[in-house]
Image (tube, rainbow, N blue to C red):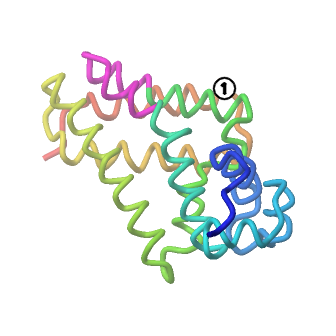
Amino acid sequence: MGRQREFDIDSALDRAMEVFWRHGYSGAPIQDVCAAMQLKPGSVYATFGSKHELFLSVVERYLDKVNRPGLELLEGNPCGLGGVRDYLDYVAEGIVTGKRRWGCLGTNAFVELSENDAKVTGVMAEHLARLEAAFRNAMERDGIPDSHDKAKFLLCAAQGLNVVAKARPDRETLDRIIAITLTAVQAPSAE
């Protein structure tokens, strides 16, 4: 009979998240990840199997813990554009308060590993599809035409904010980007 786990897995994942978020998958030595988790490598490997499986668990935890609240703001606002603004403001607030100081862990993982890692690509493709659908539904709630195309634009704008986060923009800059983004999706489509 194996020993029972003697640590809080969510807390351990949160500590590992900080290391992977800051350094990426390739730049985070497993020794540093284990030290941050306050676990010996044997415990980490016994629980997760490999660094890669640990990383996938961290990305999924990140999407649930950090991105889900923003999605709930987007989906929960009866005004579609209000929901879009709520979501983009949520991202911007994370950037200026330092909660997204290294951008988005999911986006970073996707950029770093998408060409060689089908599992990370699958997790992120699913997340991005959900976010795009939430943007499309928001546009449709307000009767905004071309909701399909405008949802794709909003997805790119949101991901762009995540990348720009690494440059540490101030709130005024982010507010201008958000205002222009909202104006663009309200504008009549060019045909």
Q: Which residue occupies 56% across, 25% down?
A: 175
The overriding secondary structure of the stretch rendered in magenta is helix
Q: Quadrant of residue 96?
A: top right
- Please name whichever residue, 26 or 140, is drawn nearer the observer in this view of the structure: 26
Q: Among all residues in the image, which is located at the extreme front?
A: 1
**Where 125 falls versus 154 (above or below)?**
below
User: Which quadrant would residue 84 be assigned to in this image?
Assistant: top left
Q: How many marks?
A: 1
Question: Percent x, y for residue 142?
Answer: 18, 22
108 left or right, relative to 67: right
Foreground residue among 105 and 7: 7
Residue at image point 35% right, 44% down: 131
Residue 143 versus residue 50 in the image, above or below: above
Residue 107 drawn in magenta: no
Q: Position of residue 169 (x, y in %)?
A: 70, 37
Residue 34, image x and y in percent?
81, 63
Placement of the N terminus among the 4 image quadrants: bottom right
Q: Which residues are magenta?
A: 70-86
Disc 1 element: helix
